[in-house]
Amino acid sequence: MTPHADTLALIERLSAFTGIRMHIDDASKLRSAVAVRERATHCHDTDAYLAMLQHLPDQAALEQERRALSAALIPLESFFFRDAGQVALLRKRLLPACLRERRASRTLRIWSAGCSTGEEAYSLAIMVAELLPLSAGWSIRIIGSDINVQALQCARAGVYPDWSFRGVPDSLRNIYFFKQREGWEILPALRAIVRFCADDLRAGAAPDLAAGEFDLILCRNVLMYYRDDALPRIVNRLTLALAPAGRLLVAHNELAIGCFPALVRQVFAESAVYRRSDSMPEKVAASPSPAALPGISRSRPAAMPAPRQHPPVTVALATPVPLPEALSYAWQLADQGAMAQANACCEQLLARTPLEPGAYYLLAHLAQESGDLQRARTLLEKVIYLEPHYVIAYLELCALYNLACEHLRASRMRRSAKRLLEGMPADAPLGTRGELKAGELLATLRGEQNAIVMYS
Ligand SMILES: C[S@@+](CC[C@H](N)C(=O)[O-])C[C@H]1O[C@@H](n2cnc3c(N)ncnc32)[C@H](O)[C@@H]1O
């Protein structure tokens, strides 16, 4: 059925106004969000609402309505310790590294951008508390920000239903929360280090979110809602907010290649992490000062980490090493920025076992790292050909197709991934080290589906 022209026009108009991706299939969700705003602004119908948008008295009123409509459109889906792989990475590597690097000043600044109802910010507080007694004389501040003011009220209340703890062991929840009639309340000592503030990532920074401030930024499951033309502002805000050694984490499905051209991408098996290039152990490019960061475009990162010195791979694989070990060695090399060696390792592995999808998958990552997106696509397509259940490969292809504006192919990939996940046990391990659970990824995809995505 051809969509009604009015609906298409409405989608077009409000997608351009908010910068949010919109899909014709989700027109009914758009209509309900608009209905919410019609009621709030006392407009009697959609035409009146659209006319009102044209006659707002000033820029501030326009921004306010943009925020309110966006908040009505974007789902608030969040839960504690979301994404087991990234959580493991934060716990084992990123947070300990941040603490090590900030040892002299004993300060740690973390930003959960697009924090929704606060689960992400409090999860970070718990992870920090696990690593560092809060009485250890450090100044620790975790800021959660969001455009949705109702979500921020819930975040400040810090009381959560059981559903927010799905996948979290009761033992962990019982240490950091106490049971109230309405749910589980975060301990005051943790609440004390977390602050929440309203902020729109598309606009200028709120006072609490100054440039150059943050050692670690999480902005997960936010970018995916925005159109390509809206992303540069957000990317710029996040980039500028990083402190010199700062790290930025986005969600798995948002690892849109080259999205942060002023930052360096470090690949770990669990996730990629973006860093200011002036903070890499081996300085590879003169880092622009925050004020001088270039305009953001969707090209590949300006700089790549220089490979560290590793033993030649030929030595490592001279004697036949069991396949899993060889692959995990190749991942280790990639984790450490030794891209050429990781590549060579994969090639050697494929010479022995030419049908190993895991090796093609790592090669695809390395190709993305080097900016060769076409090769990355071909390799990922090969992964799926060899192993049609390789869910992550479907999702990465989806991101690559989207990047090339091949939205229909992208959505086919996403649908296939979803179908596969629906047929798997919720705790089935995914990812290179099983760090991601099928149920968790499925929940993310379902959350995304609530977003309105437009094929342009
Ligand atoms: C799906 S939730 C993700 C919550 C959390 N980061 C997580 O991964 O669990 C997306 C959140 O991003 C917020 N958001 C969307 N656009 C934003 C913007 N421009 N500025 C700040 N927050 C935004 C939404 O209001 C929503 O709370």
Image (cartoon, rainbow, N blue to C red):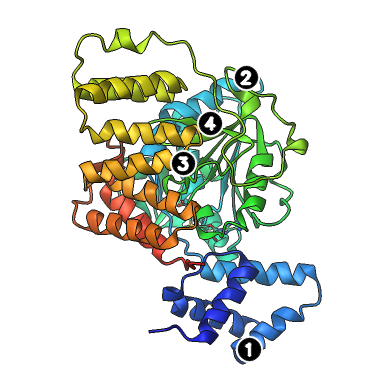
Task: Give the residue at x 58% y 70%.
Answer: 15
Q: How many marks?
A: 4
- How far apart are the two marked residues, 3 and 1, measured between alpha carbons? 43 Å
Q: Amino acid at mark 4?
A: Leu
Could you tell which of marks 3 and 1 lies nearer the N-terminus? 1
- Single out the mark in the foreground, 2 or 3: 3
Q: Amino acid at mark 1?
A: Asp
- Quarter of the figure with residue 58: bottom right
Q: Nearer the viewer, residue 271 or 115?
A: 271
Could you tell which of marks 2 and 1 lies nearer the N-terminus? 1
Which residue is at the far bottom?
44
| 248 up-or-down from 245: above or below | below
Q: Amino acid at mark 3?
A: Leu
Q: Are marks 4 and 3 in contact (CB under 8 Å)?
A: no
Which residue is at the far right?
58
> How far from the left and from the top, in percent, is residue 261?
61, 39
Could you tell which of marks 4 and 2 lies nearer the N-terminus? 4
Q: Which residue is mark 1?
A: 47
Task: Give the residue at x 52% y 77%.
Answer: 33
Q: Which residue is mark 4?
A: 134
Residue 17 in view here: yes
- Single out the mark in the foreground, 4 or 3: 3
Crowding at mark 4 (Cα within 10 Å: few <14, some 14-19, many 20+): some
Could you tell which of marks 2 and 3 lies nearer the N-terminus? 2
| Numbered disc 4: secondary structure | loop
